[in-house]
């Protein structure tokens, strides 16, 4: 069963989907009325939560049996057997709680791979084992995908993206409302998740050295505008501790690589 959430579209999408719904019993539509500017944080988590809750009502009323729950963004192109391949992964790995393929995003120079560690499923095209979804829940936060993944890990589930399954995205990640706004929101989300000020500086430098350079300025503005104004952070010490440990581990690995390179150069 597919539920398509129409987030106050004005381009005729609702009318098209409504025709699909009439023609196919397995398609449903939920049209939201709270029109707000596109925002990848709290508003996105509210939209998706509304969809999950609506679908939960439908499957309960119609006694639908299911084992998996999926979330797919509208600008994603999936291979025809995407879900079949992922369901096979769940059968192979009994502890797998959230899974996805890897993401290739369209850029000016063709498709480029989005760099995510193997334990980090895509937010744009992920599948949950039902027990994992129900145990960890989907909450309204500034960074719902990250929070969902970490809660699954903390609950003892494995999380993966599989590089033998490829997903195409019609744009670069964080560019839905422009790269400036996307990286500004990324900076805010990192602050919200409890990332340290040291990380804020390092990430700013990293993005300043990337193309286009202004994404570093946008990230810096997002992170430190929240830092200076003492905005609220996620009220979950376990998640904050997780990201703190993760950043320390990344720094240690980076220092090891730098040390090895220096020894080899000598």
Image (cartoon, rainbow, N blue to C red):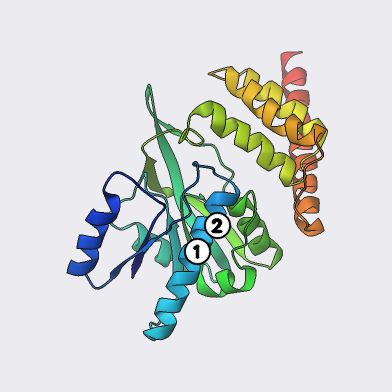
* Residue 112 against residue 120 in the figure, above or below: above
* Residue 13 against residue 217 in the figure, above or below: below
Work out which quarter of the rendered image holds the C terminus and state it.
Answer: top right
Residue at image point 44% right, 56% down: 33
Residue 238 at x, y percent in the picture: 79, 58
* Residue 258 against residue 226 in the figure, above or below: above
The answer, for residue 91, to whether it is visible in the render is no
Horizontally, residue 187 falls left or right of residue 110, namely right
Residue 81 at x, y percent in the picture: 30, 58
Is there a contact, CB below 8 Å, between mark 1 and mark 2? Answer: yes
Residue, disc 2: 46
Residue 69 is marked as none
Dividing the picture into quarters, in which one does residue 151 lie? Answer: bottom right
Residue 50 is marked as 1
The residue furthest top is 266
- Is 70 or 178 nearer to us in this picture? 178
Element type at mark 2 = helix
Horizontally, residue 89 falls left or right of residue 242, namely left
- Is 222 or 155 nearer to us in this picture? 222
Residue at image point 77% right, 48% down: 233
Element type at mark 1 = helix
């Amino acid at each position: 069963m597919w539920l398509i959430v129409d987030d106050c579209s004005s381009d005729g999408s609702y009318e098209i989907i409504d025709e699909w719904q009439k023609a196919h019993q397995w398609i449903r539509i939920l049209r939201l009325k709270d029109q707000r500017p596109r925002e990848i944080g709290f508003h996105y988590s509210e939209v998706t939560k509304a969809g999950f809750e609506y679908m939960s009502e439908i499957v309960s009323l119609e006694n639908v049996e299911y084992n998996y729950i999926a979330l797919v963004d509208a600008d994603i192109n999936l291979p025809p057997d995407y879900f079949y391949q992922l369901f096979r992964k769940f059968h192979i790995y009994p502890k797998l709680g959230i899974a996805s393929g890897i993401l290739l995003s369209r850029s000016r120079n063709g498709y480029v791979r989005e760099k995510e560690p193997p334990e980090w499923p895509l937010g744009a095209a992920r599948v949950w084992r039902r027990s994992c979804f129900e145990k960890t829940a989907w909450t309204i936060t500034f960074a719902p995908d990250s929070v969902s993944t970490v809660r699954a890990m903390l609950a003892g589930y494995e999380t993966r993206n599989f590089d033998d399954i490829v997903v195409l995205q019609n744009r670069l990640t964080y560019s839905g409302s422009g790269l400036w706004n996307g990286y500004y929101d990324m900076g805010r989300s990192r602050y919200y998740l409890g990332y340290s000020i040291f990380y804020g500086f390092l990430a700013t430098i990293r993005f300043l050295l990337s193309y286009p350079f202004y994404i570093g300025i946008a990230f810096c503005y997002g992170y430190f505008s929240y830092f200076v104004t003492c905005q609220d952070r996620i009220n979950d010490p376990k998640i904050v501790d997780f990201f703190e440990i993760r950043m320390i581990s990344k720094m240690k690995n980076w220092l090891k690589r730098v040390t090895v390179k220096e020894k080899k150069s000598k």
